[in-house]
Image (tube, helix red, strand yellow):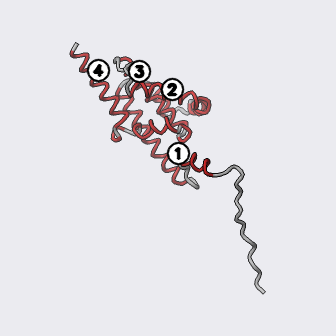
């Protein structure tokens, strides 16, 4: 019995590390973001998170860590509701990358170890690489997309009928 408890503790600690430790990968940054504003992430990042969170949920269930109302329960439930909202666009993206034999999705789909801690660690590192590329892309965007909270605040403050009333007069002609 004690060995099972030790294994359960080890798996729970590893799953929490994947979710909460910045050094383990990008999940600690991106999981809260996808739950709050899934549209702020690309379909590729959402797909990688989907694999990661489903794997975490699978390992948690297999080790009897679900059903206690904790972080893993909440994450599994909330993430599935987000996934349903973005399913259409994510499915279109997934259909396209299925044609690329060199894409990371192919590597993941071809492994027999979908739900091992090692595979989840690889996914978390892959997620970090994808997020770094996305952050570089966002820096080049004109103007950068503000976080959802700021976008909502701007929409709430701007009346629907507001029109830009500042018009510049034509330059005066030189005599």
Q: Which residue corresponds to the image point at 46% horizontal and 28% vertical from the top-left?
A: 51
* Residue 109, x across and y down, in percent: 48, 25
Spatial distance from mark 3 to mark 2, Cα to Cα?
13 Å
Q: Which residue is mark 4?
A: 8
* Numbered tag placed on residue 80 in the rendering: 2
Spatial distance from mark 2 to mark 1, Cα to Cα?
22 Å
Few, some or many residues within 10 Å of mark 4 (<14, 14–19, 20+) = some
Does label 1 or label 4 sit earlier along the sequence?
4
* Residue 75, x across and y down, in percent: 43, 28
- Considering every residue shown, the one lying at the far top of the view is 1
* Residue 143, x across and y down, in percent: 57, 55
Does label 3 or label 2 sit earlier along the sequence?
3
Q: Nearer the viewer, mark 1 or mark 4?
A: 1
Does label 2 or label 1 sit earlier along the sequence?
2
Does label 2 or label 4 sit earlier along the sequence?
4
Q: Is residue 4 left or right of residue 158?
A: left
Q: Quadrant of the C terminus?
A: bottom right
Identify the secondary structure beneath mark 3. Answer: helix
Q: Nearer the viewer, mark 1 or mark 3?
A: 1
* Numbered tag placed on residue 58 in the rendering: 3
Q: Which residue is mark 1?
A: 149
* Residue 117, x across and y down, in percent: 35, 27
Few, some or many residues within 10 Å of mark 3 (<14, 14–19, 20+) = some
């Amino acid at each position: 019995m004690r060995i099972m408890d030790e294994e359960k503790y080890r798996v729970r600690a590893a799953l929490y590390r994947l979710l909460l430790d910045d050094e383990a990968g990008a999940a600690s940054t991106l999981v809260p973001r996808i739950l709050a504003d899934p549209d702020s992430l690309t379909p590729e990042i959402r797909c990688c998170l989907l694999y990661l969170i489903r794997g975490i949920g699978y390992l948690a269930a297999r080790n009897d860590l679900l059903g206690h109302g904790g972080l893993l329960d909440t994450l599994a439930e909330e993430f599935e509701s987000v996934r349903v909202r973005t399913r259409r666009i994510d499915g279109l993206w997934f259909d396209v990358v299925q044609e690329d034999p060199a894409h990371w999705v192919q590597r993941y789909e071809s492994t027999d170890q979908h739900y091992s801690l090692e595979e989840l660690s690889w996914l978390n590192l892959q997620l970090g690489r994808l997020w770094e590329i996305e952050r570089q892309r966002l820096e080049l965007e004109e103007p950068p997309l503000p976080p959802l909270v700021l976008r909502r605040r701007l929409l709430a403050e701007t009346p629907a009928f507001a029109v830009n009333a500042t018009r510049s007069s034509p330059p005066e002609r030189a005599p």
